Image: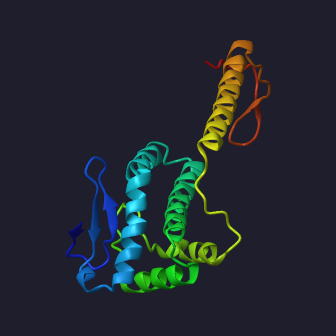
Amino acid sequence: LLQSTHEGLLVTWGLRSPRIILPTGADKWSPERIRVVLCHELSHVRRGDWLLQIVAGVVRAIYWFNPLIWIACRWLRHESERACDDDVLNLGMTGPDYATELLNIARTLRRPLWCPAPAMARPSSLQRRVRAMLNTTIDRRPVSDRSRLSIAAAASCVAMAVAGSGAAAQVVGSAFSGSFVDALNNVIPNVTMSLR
């Protein structure tokens, strides 16, 4: 556990020797808040979310122009937080107590804009997370190994089918037809174009 000099920095950092960085004033927190924060952040450590978020950030930086990547990264971060919330609730904390504590943390922490790390009480996802915490019909059990294997097999089949169809399209080739026009929308005759 480390304590930052910033009042809004509450993150987990590192892979081989993970650290939980607490904000200024964390030493004055109630035992209940300390339990909530540590259970949540240790869940991130156990799940390896730090590495996953770093990889997602690198992919987003490479494919910055693709809006689907931005949506997937946002969804990944949201689901990571929800999974950690489920872990905390599975440890015996009630949904209303956890939601109250999370809202109190969000009120007191002011997150720095430059921080790339996942924040426990990020305002943009807080409403959905609180709604999920208060929903007693959600199955909060972790996904079984059998289900994970089935999901991985299905994803591999889909990936191979998509890759195979792309390779088949390159072998078969395609024909394009149409006409070229100038700035005034007049057809330009005898234009030949080749695609490689």
Whole-percent x, y for residue 21 in the image: 27, 67
Residue displayed at 61% across by 18% down: 196
Q: Nearer the viewer, residue 15 or 61?
A: 15
In this view of the protein, can residue 125 be seen by the observer? yes
Residue displayed at 58% across by 77% down: 130
Whole-percent x, y for residue 98 in the image: 50, 79
**Residue 6 lies in what quarter of the image?**
bottom left
| Above or below, 171 relative to 55 | above
Residue displayed at 54% across by 62% down: 78
| Above or below, 8 relative to 86 | below
**Residue 35 lies in what quarter of the image?**
bottom left
Q: Is residue 12 left or right of residue 156?
A: left
Q: Nearer the viewer, residue 36 or 175?
A: 36
Q: Is residue 44 left or right of residue 20?
A: right
Whole-percent x, y for residue 183 in the image: 68, 41
Whole-percent x, y for residue 17 in the image: 25, 51
| Above or below, 126 relative to 163 | below
